[in-house]
Image: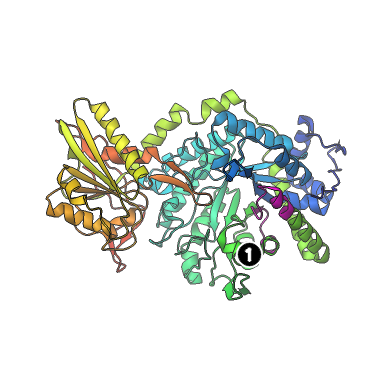
Amino acid sequence: MKKIGMTVIAACVAGLSFTTIAVPLTASQQQHLWAAPKENAERIVAQMNTREKIGQVLMLDVRNWGKNAAGEPENVTVLPAELAKVITDYRLGSVILFRENFIDTPQSYQLIQDLQKASYQLPLLISTDQEGGYVTRLREGTEMPGNMALAATRNESMAQRVGEVHGAELNALGVHINFAPVLDVNTNQNNPVIGVRSFGSNIELVNGMSAAYIKGLHQNSVLATAKHFPGHGNVATDSHFGLPQVAYSESEWRQTDLVPFKNAVDHGLDAVLTAHIIVPALDNSKVTSKKDGTEIGLPATLSKKIISGVLRDELKFKGLVFTDALDMGAIVDNFGVAEAAEKALMAGSDVLVMPVHIWDQQGIAQLEDLYRYLETESQKNPELAARLQQAATQVVQSKLANKLTPYSPHTLDYAKSVVASPEHKRFEKQVAENAITLIKNDRLLPYQLKAQNNLLVISDENARNKIVSNELQNIASELKGQQIAVTSSAFKLDENTLPSNLAENIRANDLVILITYNLKAKHTAAQKVIDQAAALNKPVVVISSRNPYDIAYLDNVKANIAIYGITGFDVTNNNRNSLEANIKAGVRTLFKANGERAALNSPKGKLPVDIRNPQGDIIYPFGHGLTY
């Protein structure tokens, strides 16, 4: 690997002279820089060479380094010396952390401390995606039930408090920027990547919840990032694997997707993350895909018309613009690494997120190739050189304006007292309980528990059954004197094959709990479960465990609740976690104790979306929600 021969910052700013020694800035030096962020950023970047500027506009992940004995990628929980050297030598400006990096609070705190020690004079900008619900990164943190669950509560004060909790925990660890909130308006019921990550389909609701959440993050000095601009809610393809297209006309887009981003900008938004989606109404440019030579539309991430034209010029957004991960299928399948990075920069993005993986020596070689390409092209193209200068200045200005330091402002003891604190976990439970939405109930719920109860739990997988079964046992222990025997059965509910012993299991139990997960069609195994139970005169309650739309694909449902998420999932690396608060609140909503009138938890949530049948008719409108 070629070591970067860079000049160190050598600027006199407010009487401050930088030396040529790679040592951290003193507190006094930082105070000088913070006093005038814009002017000082311009002076600092003016003294950088091209490779230093490239370092400032890159955000790389340090998820893995090398392989373990089984030949699998080794998660980075302790910073390897090789990675620390890359951060220093390449003068990297930013790092993004994933669930693989966060094991517990002491380890996470130390990893971030070590990352900052590897930074070269200017501190690293540390980011992560702590959206809540389906996308959460802190294993030991307070996840919260997720955006659609939060929107189901209709409580903006709760939304602000969720932002405060996420902000407090990230800030305590040394994370500066959260890639949240999601502002996508989920108007497409079959959206495969957004769904419960969205606050819903109602623009006013998305505006109110997101503004409150941003305010909460700011309470704890964490920067908020709106995503995925210009709006990922009306797509039918997951951009991790393909290149989605938004079918809106420009008028429809302006009335729907644009509004929450404009609202967030008006409420002090710090950053925007772009979407790898084609929006022909905004940019109908065509490019040739490297995959098969076909002509394709230009993704928004690479579109100057969308990023510079709409976001910068029309909305007058002055903050940081991040690309979504450039290693996602929508980009890597259709563009070269260097080409995509250059196009994104020229489109108007300030930070190129994950254009290469520095997970091994081969990755470092790819990083060097990227540096050389951008350095060479910027020498040929004055417009690219100017854009690189502008982006690097924007990054450095953000670091100075937000008073980033190369060390944590908090002690480890403080972080341990904040992350996943009992107070935060109690609030998480409260949000989940207020979010549970009773969509249908033909006098089945709350189900009266008896002294002895035999329950059949059915879902797509054993792990899902287990977490529900565990909560049923928790309820039995809590109530005392009421026994719950659980039978579990796992099979593919969106297919047609049934286990041979299904009828026997249904017959042997008092109640069937059918846990569905994003059904897309009628006449599936899930429907056959309902039909068999009806033939055997056994009650069935359906839990829509992720998106609330499943009832649209089922007939003759007697009772249905939505819990807005049963597992979190990092689609980039198949890393899962159970959303315990959602599960517990949902299961508790089903029952009342023997002799009691009230349910263990009464449903209070209201649908944040319309639920449409396969013909497109609304069968349960936005705002629908029953109670006991």
Q: Determine if the magenta segment contains residue 361.
A: yes
Q: Is residue 181 left or right of residue 74?
A: left
Residue 512's spot in the image, x, y percent? 21, 46
Within-10-Å neighbours for mark 1: few <14, some 14–19, many 20+:
many
The residue drawn where x is 68% and y is 34% is: 114
Left of 185 or right of it: where is 95? right
Q: Quadrant of the C terminus?
A: top left
Q: Which residue is mark 1?
A: 302
Residue at image x 44%, y 64%? Answer: 236
Pinpoint residue 10: horizontal percent, then vertical percent.
Answer: 86, 43
- Front one among 69 and 3: 69
Is the residue 304 above or below the residue 422 in the image? Answer: below
- Residue 271 visible here: yes
Measured along the vertical axis of the image, is residue 273 above or below residue 256? above
Camera-side residue: 594 or 399?
Answer: 594
Task: Identify which amino acid the numbered label 1 is placed on.
Answer: Leu
Q: Position of residue 179 (x, y in %)?
A: 56, 47
- Residue 327 in the magenta stretch? The answer is no
The magenta-colored residue range is 342-367
